[in-house]
Amino acid sequence: MTGGSVTASRDGSVLIVEVQGVLWRVPPQGGAAARITEWELEATRPALSPDGATPAVGGYPGGGFHLWTLRTDGSALRRITDGPWDDRGVAWSPDGSRLVFASERDGDPVTGAPFGLWTADPDGGRAVRLTGGDFEDFDPVWWPDGRSVVCVRAAHTPGGGDDGGLALVRVPVGGGPVQVVHEVADGRLVCPSVSPSGRVACVYLAGSAAGAALPPARAVLLVDGRAVSGGEDVAAAPPCWLGDGRIAYVADGRVRIRTLGRPGLVRDVPFTADMPAPRPRRRAGASCGGVTGPVRGIRLPALSPDGGTVAFVALNALWLQPLGGRPRKLLQAAAVHHLQMPAWRRTGGACCTAPTGTG
């Protein structure tokens, strides 16, 4: 697998893996995975509910990130948030009653606002702002008692940008002072995760400045501020605690479970995931006005204003074809001329082109 993320129940009996925007349920010991979402959802960073029954996920149908929930068999897919803003990085509260996420909400419908934290009922309803200010908050996760949230905080810089996320902070849900959990002098911190006893894991992107494209020079899995991964290529995705002493994460393109306190005790979870790729439908017997065999060199397609017909150039001729129908030749240019791009009149009438130049 390339990239992706993993979420699991505390006992590890339910394992949900995201690969290339599709969610799969994987047997805990590995094996054949069962696909539970379609690629159209473009699912990212699933988070499993405390009872192990309901993944929450960011999805991209319609051209914007919003929150969705579903069952672990793929049924009961439900959209939780809406609006013109991106909603990302969802996490369940310990009692399963609320979701926390990062969002551009309440900003301009096009440009959005700085990312802040919001909470919402998993059954839908109004989102409630938790943080906002002269910073960006993202990648939230609940503290075990449900009274505070840990997130990445990126401070704004004088140049108008931000520092990319040098600190993890703990934000009380009911208001109060914000506590710095961990911070670094350079690079970036992403994807915190908190164990049942309050141990904090995250991914440190070394050599990754604010606004820098991924992958970074090095990605390291940290627990309580100390590196626990070796030379692995750790994915920039939230690690998932299995109780207090084991952690599931993605590295080197594999799902791994690491037992803390026992160096070298790392187990891969091998699995296979078969994703069918639909083939384009072809109509038997279609031809281009008496031309037999494959037509090569189709150029310069132009769609009609009503979206029902396409004009194009092929074989140095201008053709018109209703979508799903047969092409009809409108104009054949002389061998010494070349047809330019066809253009439709504003009225939606016949398209036109002009032969120009000589061979």
Image: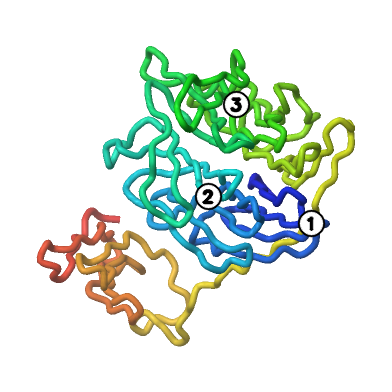
Q: Are marks 3 and 2 in contact (CB under 8 Å)?
A: no
Amino acid bearing label 2: Ser
Q: Residue at x 66, y 49 (%)?
A: 7
Q: Nearer the viewer, residue 209 or 134?
A: 134
Kindly identify which residue carries mark 1: 28
Residue 119 percent coordinates (x, y): 45, 42
Residue 221 percent coordinates (x, y): 71, 31
Amino acid bearing label 1: Pro
Q: Residue at x 55, y 49 (%)?
A: 44
Q: Residue furthest left?
A: 347
- Packing grade of label 3 (10 A; few <14, some 14-19, many >=20) is many
> Disc 2 on helix, strand or loop?
loop
Label for residue 159? none
User: What distance separates the C-alpha of mark 1 from that of mark 2?
Assistant: 26 Å
Q: Earlier in the sequence, mark 1 or mark 2?
A: 1
User: What distance separates the C-alpha of mark 3 from that of mark 2?
Assistant: 28 Å
Amino acid bearing label 3: Leu
Q: Is residue 291 left or right of residue 354?
A: right
Q: Nearer the viewer, mark 1 or mark 2?
A: 2
Residue 149 percent coordinates (x, y): 54, 33
Residue 312 versus residue 90 in the image, above or below: below
> Disc 1 on helix, strand or loop?
loop
Assign the C terminus to one quadrant of the image: bottom left
Q: Nearer the viewer, residue 5 or 95?
A: 95
Kindly identify which residue carries mark 3: 189
Q: Earlier in the sequence, mark 3 or mark 2?
A: 2
Q: Nearer the viewer, residue 293 or 182?
A: 182
Q: Nearer the viewer, mark 3 or mark 2?
A: 2
Residue 267 versus residue 344 in the image, above or below: above
Q: Nearer the viewer, residue 84 or 143?
A: 143
Q: Residue at x 65, y 60 (%)?
A: 24
Kindly identify which residue carries mark 2: 97
